[in-house]
Image (tube, rainbow, N blue to C red):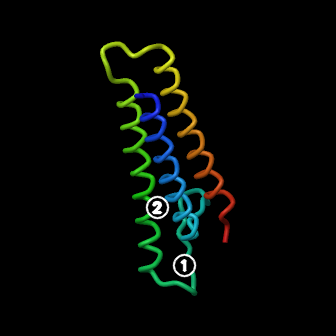
């Protein structure tokens, strides 16, 4: 039961993190030797600030849910080897998906 709860929390965190990455991509942030927020003529600074805030909140929510999933899965007197491996694999895949998505958005999002 702990494995299901742990993987569910991590999966919910990935969905929330991908939403955060989507919001950061929608603001036009990209990488040019550093993070660059372009000045677009069709939007104002308030919309961009809200998008960036929602993106950071989404990534923060991913971090919280992934941490909670790890704690749920690894709690107990002696977690079994299968449970530990499952939790660590779920967390590693979560990190890999989000790092890949962030890298894709920062490199491809070149306006």
User: Which of the two discs, 1 and 2, sits closer to the camera?
Assistant: 2
Determine the CA span between mark 1 and mark 2: 18 Å
* Residue shown at the point (38%, 24%) measured from the top left: 74
Instruction: Give the residue at the far left of this rendering.
Output: 77
Left or right, residue 8 beside residue 68:
right
Mark 2 burial class by Cα count in 10 Å: few <14, some 14-19, many 20+: many
Q: Which residue is nearer to you in this view: 109 or 50?
A: 50
Q: Residue at x 52, y 63 (%)?
A: 24
39 and 87: which is toward the camera: 87
In the image, residue 18 sits, relative to residue 50, either above or below, namely above
Residue 39 image label: 1
Above or below, 1 relative to 41? above
The disc at residue 55 is: 2
Choose between 80 and 96: the one closer to the eye. 80
Viewport quadrant of the C terminus: bottom right
Q: Which mark is residue 93?
A: none
Q: Residue furthest bottom?
A: 42
Q: Of marks 1 and 2, which one's residue comes earlier in the chain?
A: 1
């Amino acid at each position: 039961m702990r494995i299901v709860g742990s993987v569910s929390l991590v999966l919910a965190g990935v969905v929330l993190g991908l939403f955060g990455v989507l919001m950061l991509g929608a603001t036009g942030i990209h990488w040019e030797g550093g993070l660059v927020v372009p000045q677009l003529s069709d939007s104002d600074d308030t919309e961009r600030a809200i998008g960036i805030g929602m993106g950071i909140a989404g990534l923060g929510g991913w971090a919280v849910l992934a941490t909670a999933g790890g704690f749920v899965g690894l709690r107990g007197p002696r977690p079994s080897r299968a449970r530990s491996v499952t939790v660590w694999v779920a967390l590693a895949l979560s990190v890999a998906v989000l790092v890949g998505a962030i890298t894709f958005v920062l490199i491809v999002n070149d306006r």
